[in-house]
Image (spheres, rainbow, N blue to C red):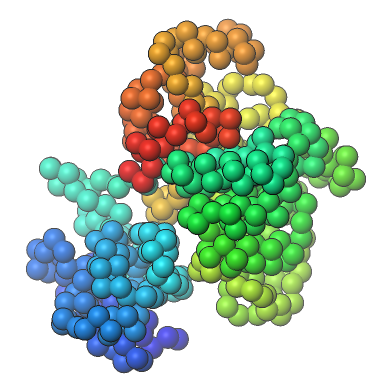
Amino acid sequence: MDEFLNAAVAEAEAGLAEGGIPIGSVLVHDGRIIGRGHNRRVQRSSAILHGEMDALENAGRLPAAVYARSVLYTTLSPCAMCSGAILLYRIPRVVVGENVMFRGEEELLRDRGVTVDVLQDTRCIAMMQRFIREHPASGTRTSGCDARGRCVTRPHRFRFGLLGENVRSATELTETARRAEAAGFATFLLRDHFIEEPFGHQLAPLAALATVAAATERLRVGSLVLCNDYRHPVLLAKEVATLDLLSAGRFELGLGAGFSRPEYEAAGLPYDPPGVRVDRLAEALQVFKGLFGAAPFTFTGRFYSVTQLEAFPKPVQRPYPPILVGAGGRRMLAIAACEASIIGIQTASLATGRRVPDPSGLLAETIAEKIGWIRQQAGARFDHIELSIVSSVVVAEHRRGAAERLVRERGWEGLSVERVLEMPSIFIGSVDQIVDEMQKRRERYGISYYVVSDRSLEMVAPIVARLAGV
């Protein structure tokens, strides 16, 4: 056990014993604790005494050279205020006990050059889970209080991803990615397919995403999604860790169980029943997480067997890069709710092994039902899952006329304009109207990460400029 994390846990326990929120922190300089503290918001009716702030305060005012050689340990992922203090004092490394119960501004810290290690320590997780269970009205970092004292959950910040569906050359790839970065998109994403239908020919995702990472500075790169059946998880884990290392921690791993029967058949791969493919993905997720860990990994399952494998390299993002699971059915959504950092809500009908132009998966009540399944299965971790959806955005002066054209283009005969305009993944109207609608839908559904086709880059850029990071 890390002695400094142990000290932070002891601080959290001391705070709990005082009747406070169990978050502890220590500041370590040259292998010695120089400041320690715990969350005292409740005890002192303080607006600012989080665990990290208490540790920094108790360390006293220090020379810049001391902060530059220090490490801050905290039992829970640091909030925006504490992350600001870390950046202000230029502390180069933060060790986080866990981010399951709350994920703070880790990406901001990494973007500003701070090394963030997340240990997912079981003591830290259990302590916060127990506190929330026993004090449901107290609130933690995921919550604030409204004017009447009711706990309210802070929404995820908006992110926008650009799906590179129409890039076919190195020039198109890098130029599109740089335009996305300049416009404020968070991620550049690629699909994973062998055949032309139904999305058109695609570049091989991992090599192309490595190229994008090399050509950009801040833009994150990711797969939407890699088919689990196309690569053994041991091989893919090495590719993912390497890409995360070479991109300085900018990779996001999107995974799916596979759906395209024609693609499987063209490649000579067995197209197993959906339940088998889903079982295999669930197992693969365990293999990925195990291989990304620090210790040699052993696993024996129905589909995969790994023996004392010490994977190299390890990803920069700890404990592993964000994992997005693309899911639409109830069982896949349940797995995603338990395992994923991000859930890509699938709206297409894929039951036949082919994409079917059926708008029922886009309807407001369908999406609401799926989010309800996620919430039910995820329990306490629901508020920490980022919900994502591939969206269609049409900037138009006349909403109704634009919606009617969309209905005709997609062959949605019999579907009313009103039903289209309330679809959670469809946005039609002026920039102001769309910005307003995205904020309302985040409040209603919790979706904050919107992915659009590269065809829409210029159209969506003004919306990204207004909402990204808000």
Q: Which residue: 52% across, 38% down?
A: 451
* Residue 119 % position (x, y): 46, 73
Vertical relation: 253 (above or below) 44: above
90 with respect to 369 (left or right): left
Vertical relation: 266 (above or below) 296: above
* Residue 401 % position (x, y): 47, 8
Residue found at the very far right of the displayed protein:
268
20 with respect to 73 (left or right): left
52 with respect to 4 (left or right): left
Front-lying residue, 36 or 191? 191
Q: Which residue: 53% across, 65% down?
A: 248
Quadrant of the frame with the C terminus = top left
Residue 287 sits in which quadrant?
Answer: bottom right
406 with respect to 8 (left or right): right
Q: Is residue 63 visible?
A: yes
Residue found at the very far left of the displayed protein:
44
* Residue 446 % position (x, y): 40, 39
Q: Is residue 27 visible?
A: no
Front-lying residue, 319 or 165? 165
* Residue 307 % position (x, y): 74, 77
Vertical relation: 382 (above or below) 428: below
Q: Which residue: 31% across, 92% down?
A: 32
